[in-house]
Amino acid sequence: MGTLRRWGAHLRHPTRFETAFVLVVWASLAFAYLGTRMVGAHDRLSAIYWTNPDWAGAPALTRTEGSIRTDREGLKRLLGDAQGYSAIWSGVLFAPTDTNYVFTITSDDGSWVALDGATVIDNGGRHGARTRTARLRLSRGPHTLGVRYFDAGGYAVIDFSWRASGLVGRVLPAGVLYQSLAGAARAPTDWTLAVARIVLGGLLLVITAAALLVGVSRLPGGLRTETALASLLFAAVLGAYAVELMARRSTAVTACDCYAYLQGATVMAARGPLHTELRDPLVPKIVAGFLTRPSDRDLAFLLSPHGHYVRDFDAGVSSNVFPPGLMWLLLPFVAAGGASWALLFLPVLTPAVALAFFLLARRHAGAWFAACVASFVVCNRVVFENTVLLMSDVPSMALTAASAYLLYLNLGKPKTALPAGAGACFGVALTVRYSNAAAVVPVFVLFAVEWARRRDFRALARDVGLFGAAATLLGVLPLALYTWTQFGTLLRMTYDPYTASRMNVAHFLLNLDFYGRSVVQTFGWPALVVVAVGLVACIVDKERRLAAVTGVLAVAAFLLPYAFERMREHRYLMPVYPWLGVFYGFGALAIGNLLRRAEAVRRLAIAALVVAPLLVTLPHLVSGTVSRDRVCGALGERVERNAVVFCDDLSGPVRLYTGLTGYRFIWTRFEVLDQTCGTIARLGRPVYFLLDCDAAKEHFGLLRENGVLASDRVAFVGDVDGNPLWRYLGAP
């Protein structure tokens, strides 16, 4: 009872109460949401396609799909160019209640919809896009569903939908789809869970806003209005961001890095946390994986013989030498619920990081500052792209920020747990991404400030020792054990000798220009002007000068090593986003101070700065990267059916949102690429190289010089939207 009384007294502080309340509610609802998501089934129908308009001959493709919606471009990407197409979708529709249902189909050319063996919509014949609707009363229970479609050339489209009478679209699920009557036995439970997911998802947003208001109501009167406005606005921003995030249905697992992480976690779950080796026939499954992958917004598990982790290509043995940290973070989820649980790790982590930034920053500098910082850090295209893909960057950002924050707290009220916790976060960050070692620069600055303030060498030595011990225990030691188990050595570079020697002074100016343009494209010039204003304000203000120095050194520590790299990637700088976010927040406060005589204008200006990151990013989240989509479309017109396309920067849309059989491949091991191309060619698949960035062109040139892609092995095809395209001819 004494402990409970102390906890109660601790929570009487308004900020602590609000923080605890929000976290408890979010955790409870999030677990409930994830639970219903895991138990519920995805909508599925059997789909059979032909490359003729008559359903004649052997099917060109058989797979399962969650919707009936495509057009000629989609059919071309899926089946290749043909004079006509035909398809049949079949399955079982579960009607949850006895009510009227509205079925609608639009097609060019003919289509037919059958329920329980009877045709209910006849939209047959050759015609342009035409819509037909049927209103039927269905009894509760399963009903067989069949849709036939053909396209005889020219424009093509089919779009089938259904809803319960009175509902607009499928805001609430009007039914659940299954491949067979046997699967429909669990339909009542699945339909209930589908409704529960929607309700719980809405409650996540509503309760967050309500919890913030509860905390606001307990603040002193003078602060309530400001905190309420900032808190509610941030709740709206976070809610809109989370809704768009969840609209992708889950994280996508695709070729290369993403698959490597999930592959490693899955093997660890079976063999132990120090093992990621497996045996698998790699190349044949690449082609099969792309041809049978689910629809765009479902999971796509694809294999890739990535140069970094293929160990014995002929035997099909791969050994993952990526940093194992993300695999260890995914391991509990994989062990508890399989891959589906692991795929929700990042979509849940990202809003949680945003909420943590908001609560912590509000505690130290106010609600408007906190809302600006949190919105800037997570509401950007780079963070979003690396959340819907299974990548290590979001945990990397969170861990490096947490390490610095704990050391910052230790400056004010030194506690033994703070440097130890900071070291633990730093150690895990190293296992997630080796380049996080650059975070030791701001760590060093914070320890130096601690010494300057306290002048207590013994206390400083103790804190450094605790930090180092925790980092070693949770970072260096697990890495050493991992590499010893995998490779028989305590220390091993992630990449092969060619990649390890990729530092070159000649890259410096080119890479500085690349990363500068990447930051501008990620945040936009207006936001970076606010960041610059915040940096200047921090330098002028003695109380904030430490933040300015530490932040600038943190950015330099991450930027400079990558400026000499052969490889370039805009997400590499993600761990410095929190520092840029801090400057953005202080810049917003500085702009607000300039407008303090006009209170309404001041609030409106800062509110605009809170919403701006989401507004800048949202078009990219909704529509994707337009230029890359354009390149993908042009590429699809140039390559043959079932081609395998090796590219670099373009891997995002190729691996996620198009029907091309392509994947990212970093050409660091010449012999692996040679074996890969030869094996794919022997399978009868055409192989192309799209040189879509400077790094790809440089690597391709090295491969030409090395002889792997000599003149008698490759031929220039032409340009695709300005990117050179080559075809592999095979061994001489």
Image (cartoon, helix red, strand yellow):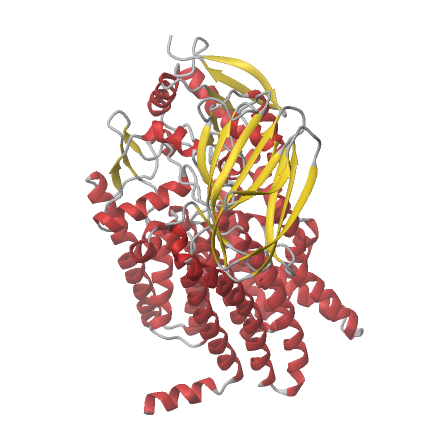
Relative to 86, does residue 83 appear above or below in the rendering?
A: above
In-front residue for pair 540/413: 413
Return the x and y of residue 25 as percentages of the image width and height: 47, 74
Say which quarter of the image contains residue 443: bottom left
Say which quarter of the image contains residue 419: bottom left
**Is 679 positioned to the left or the right of 78 in the image?**
left
Q: Residue furthest right?
A: 598
Q: Residue furthest front?
A: 118
Return the x and y of residue 597 as percentages of the image width and height: 80, 74
In-front residue for pair 444/275: 275
Look at 35% across and 62% down and name the residue there.
423
In-front residue for pair 444/210: 210
Return the x and y of residue 679 as percentages of the image width and height: 34, 20
Q: Specify the quadrant that holds the C terminus.
A: top left
**Residue 532 appearing in the image:** no
Return the x and y of residue 440 as percentages of the image width and height: 41, 55
